[in-house]
């Protein structure tokens, strides 16, 4: 690492390389399943207000975040998710990409656990969270171009969640399913190469991951990341991406 790289890293991150480790610790499956329960409950409450059939991506995401933050987190009505366990849920918060040069990357939703450790965790706090990218999938938003190319790829390329080992894709679907549309698309040779897929999407056979209401079962895929971490921390490890698709028709 050159002296200038060290200076640039310190300037962008605010801490020296000796103060943090990469990758950040795994987000364990129970946490992923909890966030899924939170999002599904938010969808239930949102649907009580009316159909989502004509709503656009930003409208749905804004409404979901409003329910999650202003209702569910404040009231603690989903067990395990409250103001003591999770920080404020952010929508569109700007973060830097892995190069620390692109400074205005904006994941759709950010869930961040409150730390109960006495010692300061060796993480980059700004980049330590479950980052969620939301995408519509319908006749005008193709799964290949939009969901994969403009969504999932951002995790693989290190625009989002570059310090993490897990992330979540949230699909707003209309007449599209994971088995009929996502899996065939991600198994195409060109898409496998683009997304550096090492494990194609598979359904999680655990309690809490099954299909529920208008939500499909939870799937997960694994992808290589071909970029180096800052400050000579090594090559980025693989990332697991969870896929939560919800019928919004």
Image (tube, rainbow, N blue to C red):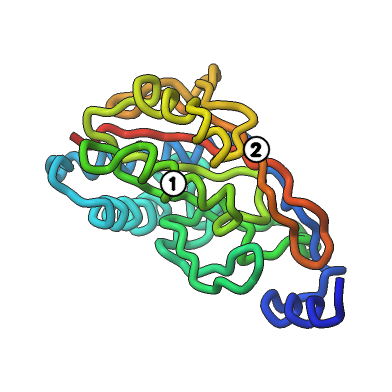
Residue 1 on image: x %, y %: 86, 71
- Residue at the spot of label 2: 28
| Residue depicted at 64% across the width and 55% down the height | 162
Q: Which mark is residue 149?
A: 1
- Mark 1 nearby-residue class (10 Å; few <14, some 14–19, many ≥20): some
Residue 58 on image: x %, y %: 27, 57
- Foreground mark, 2 or 1, reads 1
Instruction: Tell me if residue 119 comes above or below residue 181 in the rendering.
Output: below
| Residue depicted at 73% across the width and 45% down the height | 237
On the rendered image, what quadrant is the C terminus found in? top left
- Judged left or right of residue 202, residue 145 is left
Instruction: Tell me if residue 13 comes above or below residue 50 in the rendering.
Output: below
Quadrant hosting residue 2: bottom right
Q: Which mark is residue 37?
A: none
Alpha carbon distance from label 2 to label 1: 26 Å
- Residue at the top extreme? 205
Residue 27 on image: x %, y %: 64, 43
| Residue depicted at 74% across the width and 57% down the height | 228
Find out whether the residues at labels 2 and 1 contact each other: C-beta distance under 8 Å: no
- Judged left or right of residue 149, residue 141 is left
Q: Secondary structure at mark 1?
A: helix
* Residue 31 seen from this side: no
- Mark 2 nearby-residue class (10 Å; few <14, some 14–19, many ≥20): few
Q: Secondary structure at mark 2?
A: loop
- Judged left or right of residue 171, residue 169 is right
| Residue depicted at 64% across the width and 42% down the height | 239
Residue 97 on image: x %, y %: 59, 64
Quadrant hosting residue 205: top right
- Residue sitting nearer the eye, 218 or 229: 229
């Amino acid at each position: 690492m050159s002296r200038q790289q060290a200076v640039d890293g310190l300037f962008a991150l605010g801490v020296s390389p000796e103060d943090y480790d990469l990758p950040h610790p795994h987000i364990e499956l129970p946490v992923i399943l909890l966030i899924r329960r939170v999002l599904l409950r938010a969808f239930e409450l949102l649907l009580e207000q009316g159909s989502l059939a004509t709503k656009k991506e930003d409208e749905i995401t804004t409404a979901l975040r409003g329910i999650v933050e202003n209702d569910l987190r404040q009231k603690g009505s989903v067990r395990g998710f409250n103001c003591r366990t999770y920080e404020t849920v952010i929508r569109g918060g700007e973060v830097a990409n892995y190069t620390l040069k692109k400074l205005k990357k904006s994941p759709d939703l950010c869930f961040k656990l409150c730390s109960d450790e006495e010692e300061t965790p060796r993480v980059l706090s700004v980049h330590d969270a479950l980052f969620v990218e939301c995408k519509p999938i319908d006749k005008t938003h193709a799964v290949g171009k939009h969901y994969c190319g403009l969504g999932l790829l951002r995790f693989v390329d290190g625009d989002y969640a570059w310090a993490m080992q897990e992330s979540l894709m949230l699909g707003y679907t209309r007449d599209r399913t994971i088995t009929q549309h996502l899996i065939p698309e991600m198994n195409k040779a060109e898409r496998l190469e683009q997304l550096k897929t090492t494990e194609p999407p598979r359904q999680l056979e655990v309690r809490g991951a099954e299909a529920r209401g208008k939500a499909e079962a939870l799937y997960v895929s694994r992808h290589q990341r071909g970029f180096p971490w800052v400050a000579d921390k090594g090559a980025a490890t693989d990332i697991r991406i969870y896929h939560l698709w919800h019928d919004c028709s």
